[in-house]
Image (cartoon, coloured by chain):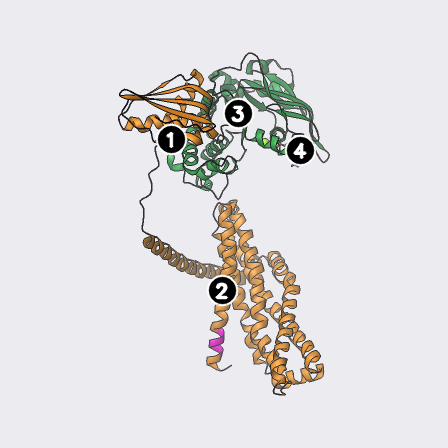
Chain colours: A orange, B green
């Protein structure tokens, strides 16, 4: 019949009476086999079929695999395959390969695209729900540990709390204050453009103060902290989980929630409101500077207007949200870290999803607070 | 490149005209002030299973890492398959590194890939083998390494230590290497698992014509599969030879190692 004259390996099939003769030649190693294995797959009975390996120059497991699969496939069809002209060492390799040739994989039953989509959607819903309940569970566990700490203050790990306050709080001061300062600048500038049209320049103070104190100062700080610390918590706890350090702690009678989660959550609870205060101040500063430069609102006027016209409630309404944001960020970061499994992939995907979820939840909470305060008239 | 290699030769013993497939000369390895190797010489012959023994921290892993190019030695020369690996060009290194496979001490499987994908990785990334052939060959290698077919879809973290070693071996064998480097392949395996692994190495050496460079502490393994043993001590290879030769070596460490109760038990079994 045909002749495959591709460089590498070659296969020639000659029909001989009832059966056929398959003459293999050339390089029957990985590279060569790639050129002929589809062609070998087309060989069919009737038999007997003789495979002649006299002209084979190189031979490795791939070549042995090609012959072994040919022989097994034809044997299943009741066609006998005989091998000729293979050197003893190669025949030995063929025998080893035939002995350990795994069964053909069973293809998973094809499912329809809609069903697959529904299944994935259902899985997502169930995962979201179980994440929610697990987060509540972790929250409860943290409350229990903190409650215990009231009775036995020595159970609280002060060194650890201070360490996390430093890395999640103090280290975030520059970025949080810079961000707030710029937000103040932007608000003042945008306000100036609009308010000048009405000759109501002085209202820029109200605009800046209310926006920064009530909403933006604390919200953006929380978003920055979510990006910095939720990921750090997930990565550090997650890599401990990956290397079975968490399991080791459990077997030693150490409680990972008390040792790892509580200090992180408490540290955030302490530092996020403080960062919020810093952001409020620098936000006002940025706005004040810009109002002075573009509208000529002097610092004295700014401060006077601020103290006369802006009730302190705005500031309190902003700050009261901070501990809630801190709790959400800390719990999500630690929870995702504890969910990490034994592979690098899950560490990466959980770290990124912890940041996304933490930021999303902060914004959702903020919206809920906005509705709540509007309803109670604050 | 592949064609020049003779096919799987079943050899029970090292061939008579001994061709050195790895030649290490005057190797010096220093980390800071710590000298790990100082003027180390070693030959590995084609088709043999060489066992490397030596105390913990004597530099067995560093020797292996130096040969496969993961650790640049301070001085010395290393030739693998005739290529001077320390001074070779990039393509030469690439070509020669396709002809060795390495099983690391902790298997070093890619944790985010399944066992099958681990074995497919070199076939895909290095040889660019088409998918159906690649998958079939990976499954064959996994089976040859003695893992059941259902291990293919598992992730490394779902396997026991012994199964991880087998999966690591399957990956090391993926490209049909001429040489495999095994770093403590049976460490941490139960005796039955270790015996099965020894058996596997011996079988594969026979049918694939492998040269095996094996770091091991396991006296049973040394006895069961190694043609030759090289002892690493005092920053050098202080002795090479068969198990019987080792018994005659004068060095106190070698004496203690091969005359201890464990050694005697291993010899008695054989
Ligand atoms: N990258 C490195 N940096 C510094 N020291 C190293 C490094 N790798 C190995 N060593 C040192 O070299 C010595 C030999 O290590 P190794 O080869 O791993 O020992 P073993 O014989 O147990 O496999 C050890 O003392 C180790 O501390
Ligand atoms: Mg070692």
Disc 4 versus disc 3: nearer the observer: 3
Disc 1 versus disc 4: nearer the observer: 1
Residue at mark 3: B178
Q: Locate residue B50 relative to residue B139 in the image: left or right.
A: right
Disc 2 versus disc 1: nearer the observer: 1
Whether residue A252 is visible to the viewer of this picture, yes or no, is no
Q: Residue at x 51, y 46 (%)?
A: A344
Label 3 C-beta lies within 8 Å of the nearest ligand 2 atom: no
In the rendered image, residue B119, in percent from the top left (x then y), is placed at 47, 36
The kind of secondary structure element at disc 4 is: loop
State which chain disc 2 sits on. A
State which chain disc 1 sits on. A
Residue at mark 2: A360
Classify mark 1: residues with Cα within 10 Å, few (<14), some (14-19) or many (20+): few
Answer above or below: position of B194 versus A198.
Answer: above
In the rendered image, the quadrant that contains the N terminus of chain B is: top right
């Amino acid at each position: 019949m045909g002749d495959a004259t591709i460089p590498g390996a070659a296969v020639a099939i000659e029909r001989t009476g009832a059966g056929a003769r398959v003459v293999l030649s050339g390089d029957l190693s990985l590279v060569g086999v790639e050129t002929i294995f589809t062609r070998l797959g087309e060989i069919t009975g009737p038999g007997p079929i003789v495979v002649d390996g006299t002209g084979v120059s190189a031979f490795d497991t791939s070549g042995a695999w090609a012959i072994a699969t040919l022989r097994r496939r034809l044997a299943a069809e009741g066609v006998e395959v005989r091998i000729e002209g293979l050197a003893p060492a190669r025949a030995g390799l063929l025998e080893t390969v035939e002995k350990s040739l795994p069964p053909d994989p069973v293809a998973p039953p094809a499912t329809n695209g809609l069903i697959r989509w529904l299944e994935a959607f259902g899985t997502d819903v169930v995962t979201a729900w179980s994440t929610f309940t697990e987060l509540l569970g972790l929250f409860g566990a943290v409350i229990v540990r903190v409650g215990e700490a009231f009775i036995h203050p020595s159970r609280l790990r002060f060194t650890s709390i201070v360490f996390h306050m430093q890395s999640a709080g103090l280290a975030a001061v520059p970025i949080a204050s810079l961000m707030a300062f710029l937000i103040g600048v932007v608000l003042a500038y945008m306000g100036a453009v609009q308010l000048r049209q009405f000759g109501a320049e002085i209202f820029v103070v109200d605009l800046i103060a209310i926006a920064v104190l009530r909403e933006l100062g604390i919200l953006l700080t929380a978003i920055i902290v979510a990006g910095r610390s939720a990921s750090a918590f997930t990565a550090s706890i997650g890599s401990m989980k990956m290397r079975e350090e968490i399991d080791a702690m459990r077997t030693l009678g150490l409680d990972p929630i008390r040792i790892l989660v509580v200090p992180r959550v408490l540290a955030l609870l302490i530092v996020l409101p403080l960062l919020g205060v810093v952001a409020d101040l620098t936000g006002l500063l940025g706005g004040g500077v810009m109002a002075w430069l573009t509208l000529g609102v002097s610092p004295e006027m700014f401060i006077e207007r601020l103290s006369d016209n802006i009730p302190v409630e705005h500031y309190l309404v902003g700050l009261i949200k901070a501990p809630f944001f801190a709790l959400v960020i800390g719990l999500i970061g630690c929870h995702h870290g504890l969910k990490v499994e034994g592979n690098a992939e899950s560490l990466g995907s959980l770290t990124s999803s912890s940041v996304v979820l933490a930021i999303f939840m902060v914004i959702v909470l903020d919206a809920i607070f906005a509705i709540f305060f509007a309803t109670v008239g604050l | 490149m592949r064609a020049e290699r003779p096919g799987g030769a079943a050899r029970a013993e090292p061939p008579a005209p001994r061709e050195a497939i790895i030649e290490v000369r005057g190797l010096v390895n220093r980390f800071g002030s710590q000298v790990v190797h100082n003027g180390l010489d070693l030959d590995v012959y084609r088709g043999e299973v060489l066992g490397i023994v030596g105390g913990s921290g004597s530099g067995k892993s560093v020797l292996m890492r130096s040969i496969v190019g993961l650790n640049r030695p301070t001085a010395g020369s290393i030739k693998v398959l005739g290529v001077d690996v320390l001074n070779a060009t990039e393509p030469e290194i690439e070509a020669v590194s396709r002809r060795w496979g390495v099983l690391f001490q902790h298997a070093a499987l890619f944790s985010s890939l399944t066992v099958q994908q681990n074995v497919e990785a070199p076939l895909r990334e290095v040889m660019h083998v088409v998918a159906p052939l690649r998958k079939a060959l990976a499954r064959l290698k996994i089976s040859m390494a003695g893992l059941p077919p259902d291990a293919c879809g598992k992730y490394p973290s779902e396997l026991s230590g012994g199964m991880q070693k087998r999966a690591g071996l399957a990956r090391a064998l993926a490209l049909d290497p001429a040489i495999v480097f095994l770093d403590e392949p049976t460490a941490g395996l139960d005796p039955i698992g270790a015996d099965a692994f020894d058996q596997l190495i011996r079988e594969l050496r026979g049918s694939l014509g492998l040269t095996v460079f094996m770091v091991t502490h396991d006296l049973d393994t040394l006895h069961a599969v190694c043609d030759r043993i090289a002892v690493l001590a005092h920053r050098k290879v202080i002795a090479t030879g068969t198990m019987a030769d080792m018994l005659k070596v004068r060095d106190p460490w070698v004496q203690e190692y091969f005359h201890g109760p464990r050694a005697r038990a291993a010899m008695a079994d054989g």
